[in-house]
Image (tube, rainbow, N blue to C red):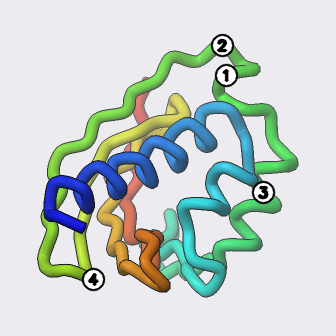
Amino acid sequence: MTSTDDTKAIESVIKSYLDGLHEGDAGKIASAFHPTSALTSISEAGELAITPRDVWLNNVRNRPSPKQRGLPRHDQVLSIDLVGPTMAYVKLKCAIPPRFFTDQLSLLKIDGRWQIAQKVFMTELRD
């Protein structure tokens, strides 16, 4: 696989993630994230918050999707850094208004397939 092929494969993973987030499709999101992955952020109380992937996916399943709510998409991939043949970083912005997110995604190529291994993110509340 060339670096161009890897970049296209990473873009496909990110598309599945962002489409799944907007549509509320936990299956699409799950396909992008490794089963052992977690989401890490700072809570509103200023504490480190780590949410396992499957806990987050359950939350996605049990809330109305942004698409169902008629909310616009705010997806923007800021950078894709292909560090090497098995590691990449993606920085992006997305939103479920009024929450706007900046994600830093660590991807690993596991068994020949790119997967998000870790998501670190921050949230901004906007009117």
Query: Tag 4: residue type?
Result: Thr
Q: Position of residue 26 (x, y in %)?
A: 74, 52
User: Disc 1 vs disc 4: which is toward the camera?
Assistant: 4
Question: Label 1: few (<14), some or many (≥20) within 10 Å?
Answer: some
The label shown at residue 67 is: 1
The answer for how far apart the CA atoms under marks 4 and 3 are is 30 Å
Of residues 97 and 8, the one drawn nearer to the viewer in this rendering: 8
Name the residue at 15% across, 68% down.
Answer: 82
The answer for how far apart the CA atoms under marks 1 and 4 are is 33 Å
On the image, which quarter does residue 78 sit in?
A: top left
Of residues 121 and 106, the one drawn nearer to the viewer in this rendering: 106
Q: Earlier in the sequence, mark 4 or mark 3?
A: 3
The label shown at residue 70 is: 2
The answer for how far apart the CA atoms under marks 2 and 1 are is 5 Å
User: Disc 4 vs disc 3: which is toward the camera?
Assistant: 4
The answer for how far apart the CA atoms under marks 1 and 3 are is 16 Å
Q: Are marks 1 and 4 in contact (CB under 8 Å)?
A: no
Q: Which residue is mark 4?
A: 86
